[in-house]
Amino acid sequence: MYELEVEDTFDGDRLNEDLWLPYYLPHWSDRAAAAARFQVGGGSLVLTVDEDQPPWCPEFDGEARVSSLQTGAYAGPLGSAIGQHRFSDRAVVREEQPGLRLYTPTYGRFEARAKALDDPDAMVALWMIGYEDRPERSAEICVFEIFGSEAEPGRAQVGMGVHPFGDPRITDDFTKVPLPIDVRDFHVYAAEWSPGQVAFFVDGEQVKTVAQAPDYPMQFMLGLYDFRRRPGRYPKRFEVDYFRAWRFVH
């Protein structure tokens, strides 16, 4: 059984900063470059990337622009290699950050109702990373990941699964599941994370199961990514209707 623990329906006109930190991995960059651009109102969150938006971390991630929210933050001292989701072997802490645990559950059911986009230079995702207060607590659970280049009317590839990163107990099990849906419309993407297993759902239908699972606190990452490989149309928009999280009740 599950009990609703967190619900954000974006009904107000301000982001709930008791739940979301509006920066993307700012320790590898700085808060100015890593700041999300977004609007909240009318019962939805819209993450945007604008044409004038700077790269979030040009030293290590090229021209990528990101507008992303996260529910925790952990990093070491300035100049260190200690920090969440060290995506490059060259990355070091460029700006020290206060440690935050806004929402870092272990196990539960989590879902978002969202519209993706078919822009060939964009990707949207809801994913979880280990809080990483210990280096091995660093696996990822990807609830959904959709590249605009893999979406077209009536069909799309929806990525989901787990990645180990620095967790030696997890093996990579990630799939791009072909689905007969138009991801430009609202759909519900969900994951049930339990001891030894993660099950993935789209619109209530179970579409993938992984027979392994992290067993430590994880935080959420909800974001829009612009890779700037070619001239594009702006602003890019990723709309989220709600985010909900349930905990297990024994």
Image (cartoon, grey):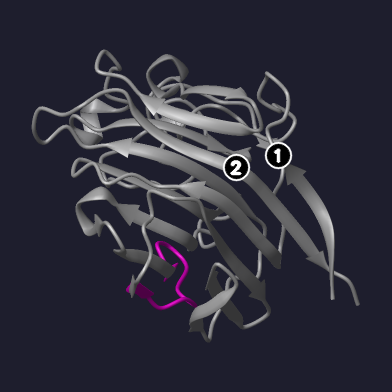
The extreme left residue here reads: 230
Q: Are marks 2 and 1 in contact (CB under 8 Å)?
A: yes
Q: Secondary structure at mark 1?
A: loop
186, above or below 34, in the image: below
Q: CA distance from mark 2 to mark 1?
A: 6 Å
> Tag 2's secondary structure?
strand
**Quick one: label 1, few (<14), some, or many (20+) residues within 10 Å?**
some
The relative height of residue 30 versus residue 24 in the rendered view (above or below) is: above
The residue that disc 1 covers is: 9
**View extreme (bottom): residue:** 211
> Residue 204 or 139: which is nearer the viewer?
204
Residue 147 is situated, as x and y percent measured from the top left of the image, at: 28, 52
Name the residue type under label 1. Thr
Residue 131 at least partly seen: no
Q: What amino acid is found at the position of numbered circle 2 in the picture?
A: Asp
Q: Which mark is residue 241?
A: 2
Left or right relative to 160: residue 70: right
Which of the image's four quarters has the N terminus? bottom right
Q: Is residue 55 above or below residue 89?
A: above
Query: Residue 99, percent across and down?
Result: 65, 33
Can residue 95 be seen by looking at this rendering?
yes
Q: Residue at left 20%, top 27%?
A: 233
Residue lying at the far front of the rendered structure: 154
Q: Which residues are magenta?
A: 162-177
The picture places residue 93, in percent across and down from the top left corner, at: 41, 30
Outermost residue on the right side: it is 250
